[in-house]
Image (tube, rainbow, N blue to C red):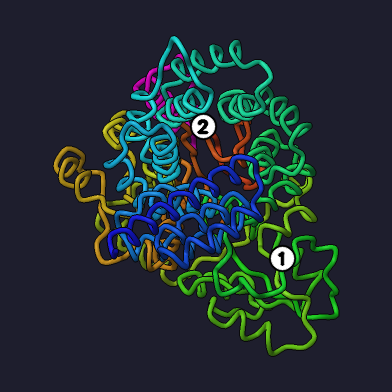
């Protein structure tokens, strides 16, 4: 009798599952949820898995996550919960969790196309492009190509700088799927760095059919800013603050999630207190401070929230402004009645930097180093090296892996510059440089490595050391912004793989700083020829 009851229970559960599947297929989510609740009362783990799936289809991501996680915790072999946690975390832009669940699901279902595509997409978001590419290639059937797989391959090849392959597949996909909006977006992203004008046209075309696409507007803003269309670019740049873009955009400190945010400085009441919060990316912070003095004139009742390591530099440079670390921000916001709320530092650019002219006419230095430290460092360096020109150098930049590949010009290539005998070169490179130090020590007696200063944590000392140099030669990194904002002479080295928007496309001089010369490598020039050219310019230029 007991076995018959058990069999009957299993049969009923299977019947309910089939009904849920039918309701999902017809998008009858109300009925699907009713049946899922019945299944929960019979067998909690599969019932919750179906509940989570219904919530996912309805884009109710928090409910979907809660149901699917509980289902999987109750039964780690509940594969319906496992495979659907991947798209949940993709949509929630929690890519580490999407990768973790994707890895587990892919081990069990390596031939399941949906699992494989979602897992590969998660890997791509975590910049694990080689792994993602291997999965997409395993799914690719040239005789019967599918758009999601083609799109994945194009994105992977683009991210790995295999431009010929990405361009070839993009052209092939466009012939097969001429009406695909996904391919319009991919074309825009593919050409954003190499051909921004072409990319902007594609972005505008894509937005005609997807005007509310936040990620699309964010990507387009970077192209508009690179083309110096600042009036449009800064407006779209605010899309980077939205959760749909996630950590690759402009995520604010989580402490401010519940605070009132304003993105248009024209909405601020100068008679009320305004809290300005800096954003991630310390180079961008320094760039954005270029108009902060103008902002303080218009809004003198300003409180600046920044990270502690910037405190001494900012308090010297903007002495009239109240300055607090991140943790104090929400407390201030909650205890001062007469406040406007907070505004991200990047948002004030749209008012004060709407054009190229607004940059060029405001190139006055605005960051002030510790003069005592600067003179001490300079004196010590000159005592040890003789009365030669001091040149600070940096060869690596970027936080994201792909950004590092576009910015970095390895020290091995700097031979033509380091062979200039009339200069002493001072490493200002932050991060781990032991490999380069061990390799270069003994080869160049005029290359000096500084011990005793943590370039990442002790920004004030690093900044003072950089300002102790007569000039700086560097790839695009925070160093360039710091010394540029102090009015120092800079030779900026850009690879042919792309560059941050502020350096433009063809300019030989930076628009945001008064004494930055831009050296652009082009594809037809070898890396050795590029460095020889830069070395010759430095050699024949009078400081």
Pick the residue in front: 297 or 204.
204
Give the secondary structure at mark 2.
loop
Pick the residue in front: 301 or 132.
132
x, y (%) of residue 65?
A: 49, 60
Count of marks placed on residues: 2
x, y (%) of residue 173?
A: 55, 16
Q: Which residue is mark 1?
A: 293
Does the segment drawn in magenta span residue 539?
A: yes
Label 2, residues with CA under 10 Å away: few <14, some 14-19, many ≥20 = some
Please, is residue 251 above or below residue 411 in the view? below
Q: Is residue 242 left or right of residue 416?
A: right
Location of residue 63 (image quadrant): bottom right
Please, is residue 249 above or below residue 474 in the view? below
On residue 467, which mark appears?
none
Instruction: Mark yes or no: residue 286 visible.
Output: no
What residue span does the magenta drawing correspond to? 519-543
Q: Which residue is mark 2?
A: 498
Does the segment drawn in magenta span residue 469?
A: no
Instruction: Mark yes or no: residue 311 visible.
Output: yes
Pick the residue in front: 394 or 392.
394
Please, is residue 178 above or below residue 312 in the view? above
Taking the spot 72% from the left edge, 76% from the top edge, the residue there is: 302
x, y (%) of residue 4?
A: 32, 58
């Amino acid at each position: 009798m007991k076995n018959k009851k058990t069999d009957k229970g299993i049969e009923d559960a299977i019947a309910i599952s089939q009904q849920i599947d039918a309701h999902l297929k017809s998008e009858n989510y109300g009925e699907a949820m009713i049946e899922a609740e019945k299944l929960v009362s019979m067998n909690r783990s599969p019932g919750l898995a179906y509940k989570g799936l219904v919530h996912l289809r309805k884009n109710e991501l928090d409910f979907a996550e809660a149901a699917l996680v509980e289902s999987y915790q109750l039964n780690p072999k509940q594969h319906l919960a496992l495979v659907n946690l991947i798209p949940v975390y993709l949509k929630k832009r929690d890519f580490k969790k999407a990768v973790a669940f994707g890895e587990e699901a892919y081990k069990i279902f390596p031939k399941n196309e949906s699992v494989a595509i979602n897992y590969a997409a998660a890997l791509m978001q975590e910049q694990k492009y080689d792994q993602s590419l291997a999965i997409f290639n395993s799914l690719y059937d040239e005789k019967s190509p599918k758009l999601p797989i083609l799109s994945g391959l194009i994105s992977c090849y683009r991210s790995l700088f295999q431009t010929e392959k990405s361009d070839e597949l993009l052209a092939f996909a466009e012939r097969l799927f001429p009406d695909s909006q996904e391919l319009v977006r991919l074309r825009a992203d593919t050409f954003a760095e190499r051909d921004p004008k072409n990319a902007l046209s594609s972005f505008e075309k894509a937005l005609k059919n997807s005007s509310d696409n936040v990620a699309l507007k964010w990507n387009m803003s970077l192209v508009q800013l690179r083309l110096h269309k600042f009036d449009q670019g800064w407006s779209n740049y605010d899309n980077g603050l939205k959760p749909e873009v996630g950590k690759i955009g402009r995520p604010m400190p989580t402490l401010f999630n519940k605070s009132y945010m304003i993105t248009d400085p024209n909405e601020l009441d100068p008679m009320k207190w305004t809290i300005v919060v800096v954003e991630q990316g310390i180079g961008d912070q320094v760039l954005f401070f270029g108009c902060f003095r103008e902002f303080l004139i218009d809004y003198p009742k300003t409180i600046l929230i920044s990270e502690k390591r910037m405190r001494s530099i900012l308090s010297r440079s903007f002495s009239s402004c109240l300055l607090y670390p991140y943790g104090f921000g929400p407390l201030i916001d909650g205890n001062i009645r007469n406040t406007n709320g907070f505004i991200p530092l990047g948002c004030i650019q749209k008012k004060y930097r709407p054009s190229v002219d607004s940059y060029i006419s405001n190139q006055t230095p605005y960051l002030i180093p510790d003069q005592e430290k600067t003179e001490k460092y300079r004196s010590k360096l000159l005592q040890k090296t003789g009365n030669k020109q001091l040149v600070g150098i940096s060869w690596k930049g970027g936080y994201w892996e792909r950004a590092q590949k576009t910015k970095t010009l390895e020290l091995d290539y700097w031979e033509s510059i380091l062979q200039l005998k009339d200069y002493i070169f001072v490493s200002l490179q932050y991060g781990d440089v032991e490999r380069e130090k061990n390799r270069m020590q003994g080869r160049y007696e005029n290359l000096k490595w500084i011990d005793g200063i943590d370039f990442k944590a002790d920004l004030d000392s690093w900044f003072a050391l950089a300002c102790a140099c007569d000039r700086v030669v560097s790839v695009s990194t925070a160093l360039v912004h710091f010394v540029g904002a102090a009015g120092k002479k800079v030779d900026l080295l850009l690879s042919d793989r792309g560059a941050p928007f502020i350096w433009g496309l063809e300019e030989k001089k930076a628009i945001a700083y008064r004494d930055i010369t831009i050296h652009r490598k082009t594809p037809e020039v070898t890396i050795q020829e590029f460095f020889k050219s830069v070395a010759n310019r430095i050699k024949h230029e009078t400081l």
